[in-house]
Image (cartoon, grey):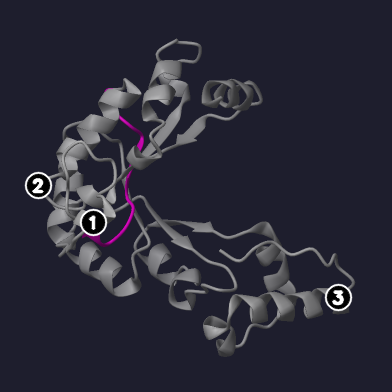
Amino acid sequence: MLETALNAALEVGYRHIDTTYVFENEKIIGRWISTGKIKRDNFYITTKLALCGVHPDRVEMMLKESLEELRLNYVDLYLLHFPVGTNYVERCLVTPPTMLKLENSDHVELCKKMEEQVDAGRTKAIRLSNFNRKQIVTILKSCRIKPAYLQIEIHVAIQQRELDGRKQTRKNSERQITKRPKEYREAKKKIEFQPRYEEASEDKIEATLLKKKEEVGESNRLPAVY
């Protein structure tokens, strides 16, 4: 099914494949890429460091595993997905809940290991995701290769005002990618959000948005909050 979806997507012009180790689809993507239907230079491949790989001693190992599955010598972008990590259990994509332990994450040392992957040619660039402003500043003060992107989640339930302004990312020549449903982007243009929304329940948020949409004559259909 994934190969069928890849064929359909690439036929209409998609060239960016964004995957991750824990999706368990890197092998299928790699098999498709190896067919040679499209030249490697025409792809943009992103993959991510799994939670169980968020440790300086496991960064290189996890990227090498992803490259082997993808049948590639390098990816275009390697993503440090979360600022926290878990213990690693051999032969497990995700650490089993019964064995799960959170580990302390040294962000400075982690980024040094990410930089080493750029030096080794295994990735063209690195990116941060779900990091807060304090963590980003710590990394920027010590990094040798600045992260190419900052990916954050922004919508009515998670506003992250200190990052959504993008002053910090512009100042440090960092591009920002935001994840937010289209309906919330449209709603945000029309609704002046107050601080109380940040702690509101999902039901209250949807009820408030529904009322505002009715006032401006829009559709009553709302997406799920996530």
**On the image, numbered disc 1 is attached to which residue?**
98
Q: In screen coordinates, is 108 left or right of 199?
A: left
Mark 3 residue element: helix
Which amino acid, mark 3? Glu
Q: Residue at x 24, y 49 (%)?
A: 95
Between residue 167 and residue 139, name the one nearer to us. 139
Give the mark, 2 or 1, whose residue is nearer the N terminus.
2
**On the image, numbered disc 3 is attached to which residue?**
214
Q: In screen coordinates, is 218 left or right of 173?
A: right
**On the image, numbered disc 2 is attached to which residue?**
57
Which amino acid, mark 2? Asp
Dominant secondary structure (helix, strand or loop) of the stretch shown in magenta: loop
Q: Give how far apart the Cα atoms at labels 3 and 2 are.
A: 54 Å
Quadrant for the C terminus, please: bottom right
The image quadrant of residue 9 is top right
Give the mark, 1 or 3, whose residue is nearer the N terminus.
1
Which amino acid, mark 1? Thr
Give the mark, 3 or 2, whose residue is nearer the N terminus.
2
Residue 197 in picture, x, y percent from top left: 59, 83
Between residue 56 and residue 74, name the one nearer to us. 56
Q: Residue pushed farthest front?
A: 98
Bounds of the magenta segment: 73-85
Q: Residue pushed farthest right?
A: 217
